[in-house]
């Protein structure tokens, strides 16, 4: 299963498949290295997570392992998950605010679109930057996109 597909995204497709076929074994094969995307896929019901550049032998071995009931996440993504495991995750509202900022909106426009005050947007951005260890708004957006917290 890929995460980016026309019509329905991979996470939604995993959920649909797992509802219809509870014993389905799903392996994500994607270009997205983000630890948050990988966690979402595993929580949705995927048994494994590989990148499209995976060597043929590793792909075959992983398919066999996952089919036998094991879970597998490529080491580089697993280490990112482990590195961020104890961090505070962004709240749903913080994710929405950051998505609005990533779209190029000022604090004032974000506030208007979310029916909150500009001071609340600033407070959310302060929390977001602290949680992501970002230097500024642009850095926060870059980190969030790399990790798969937000997409454009």
Image: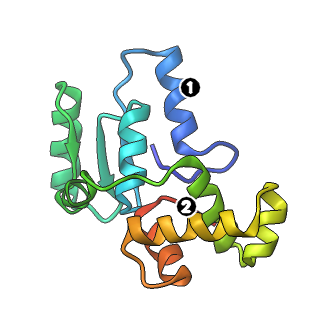
Query: Residue at 56% of width from left, 26% of height from top?
Result: 16
The residue to which callout 2 is attached is 150
Q: CA distance from mark 1 to mark 2?
A: 22 Å
Q: Is residue 145 visible?
A: no
Residue at the far front in the pictured view: 119
Where is residue 32? Give x, y as percent: 42, 61
Numbered mark located on residue 112 in the image: none
Q: Position of residue 70 (x, y in %)?
A: 17, 31
Q: Badge 1, how many Cα within 10 Å: few under 14, some, many 20+?
A: some
Q: Secondary structure at mark 2?
A: loop
Q: Is residue 110 above or below residue 114?
A: below
Q: Is residue 48 above or below residue 140?
A: above
Rendering coords of residue 52 (x, y %): 36, 60
From the viewer's perspective, is 109 left or right of 152? right
* Mark 1 or mark 2: whose residue is earlier in sequence: 1
Which of the numbered marks, if any, corresponds to residue 16?
1
Left or right, 103 with respect to 132, comes to right
The residue sitting at 70% across, 45% down in the picture is: 7
Residue 39 seen in render: yes
Residue 124 position, x and y percent, is 58, 63
Query: Which residue occupies 53% across, 15% down?
Result: 20
């Amino acid at each position: 299963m890929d995460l980016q597909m026309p019509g329905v995204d991979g996470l939604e497709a995993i959920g649909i498949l797992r509802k219809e076929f509870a014993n389905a074994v799903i392996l994500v094969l994607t270009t997205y290295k983000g630890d948050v995307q990988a966690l979402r896929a595993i929580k949705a019901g995927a048994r494994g997570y590989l990148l499209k550049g995976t060597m043929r032998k590793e792909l075959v071995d992983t398919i066999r392992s996952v089919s036998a009931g094991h879970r597998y996440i490529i080491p580089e993504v697993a280490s990112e998950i482990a590195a961020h495991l104890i961090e505070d995750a962004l709240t749903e509202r913080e994710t929405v605010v950051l998505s609005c900022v990533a779209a190029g909106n000022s604090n004032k426009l974000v506030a208007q679109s979310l029916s909150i005050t500009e001071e609340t947007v600033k407070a959310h951005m302060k929390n977001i930057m602290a949680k992501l260890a970002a230097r500024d708004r642009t850095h926060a957006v870059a980190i969030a996109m790399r990790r798969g917290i937000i997409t454009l």
